Image: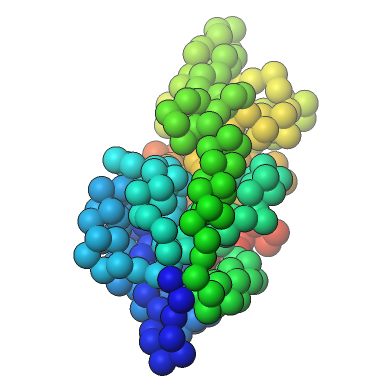
Amino acid sequence: MSIAANDRPRALIAEDEPNLAAYLRERLAAAWPELEIVEVAGNGPDALRSIEEHDPDVLFLDIRMPGLSGLEIARRAGEGVHVVFVTAYDQYAIQAFEQEAVDYLLKPVTDERLSETVRRLRDRLRTPPKGDDLKHALDALSRVLPALNGRAVPGRLAWIRASVGNQVRLIAVEEVCYFQANDKYTSVFTMEGEALIRISLKELAEQLDPERFWQIHRGTIVNLAAVASTMRDLTGRTQLRLKARPETLAVSRAFAHRFRQM
């Protein structure tokens, strides 16, 4: 749909992580003051209900959500709406559909990237979108993100065989609090203790789900579900408190921007 000069554009945010949703809403208010956020939905069915009720011009859709995926919501939203996917998937895969009508924001969202998205959306709101463009973009997204159709992403780890003393344990990845580089190996920290795996942190990072595991330091990858809170030390550096372990984890300056939204 096109927007008249004196009309205020409306948007829906669909994101199941409250901190990320609040952060996106806050940054949109700064980057696009005239944009009205009609609702923040925490799952797919609520997002569809809100679309029917408010008829927004723009949808900011998380890709993985309870109930319905962002792709399914976009398909059901119909023509005339501008869709921005919010995703943790690598931008090289997204290049397959970047040139189509659908835009994207890569988690964690930066102010620079959000500003570019706002510029694109403002331009597109002046011209009605073509239904075929949206359909082609969604089809491309289906091909590069098979997980949206309920299939596992190839190469994602679910279990780890780790050494604990003279024993070998099978550890579920979801039980890991964080990974830390240990020479040519990697230390695995759970609420129960520490184990060792014979793989480098770099190799391990390629097999972990980027939506759940974030690199916070050259030698550390943390499970976001294990983070209780963030804080700043006397030098202004970000530290992470964990839910199930007593130590705090230092976030290097290169990765500190990831936690501004938390």
Quadrant for the N terminus, please. bottom left
Whole-percent x, y for residue 214 in the image: 58, 45
Number of marks in picture = 0
Along the viewing direction, whichever of 158 and 190 lies nearer the viewer? 158
Of all residues, the one furthest to the right in this rendering is 184
Whether residue 57 is visible = yes
65 versus 250 height, above or below? above
The colour scheme of the drawn protein is: rainbow
Residue drawn at (77%, 26%), measured in percent from left and top? 184
The image quadrant of residue 55 is bottom left
Among the 4 quarters of the image, the one containing residue 243:
top left
> Where residue 68 sits: x, y (%)?
33, 42
Q: Is residue 75 above or below residue 27?
A: above
Which residue is depicted at the point 40% across and 79% down? 9
Q: Residue at x 53, y 37 (%)?
A: 142
Closer-to-camera residue (181/93): 93
* Residue 171 higher or lower than 220, as above or below: above
Q: Is residue 132 left or right of residue 76?
A: right
**Measured from the top left, where is residue 211 in percent x and y?**
52, 43
The answer, for residue 21, to whether it is visible in the render is no
Q: Position of residue 153 (x, y in %)?
A: 55, 28
Q: Residue furthest bottom?
A: 6
- Left or right of residue 11: residue 184: right
Quarter holding the C terminus is bottom left
In-front residue for pair 83/150: 83
Write the residue at 41% across / 58% down.
79
Task: Give whichever of 109, 13 is nearer the camera.
Answer: 13
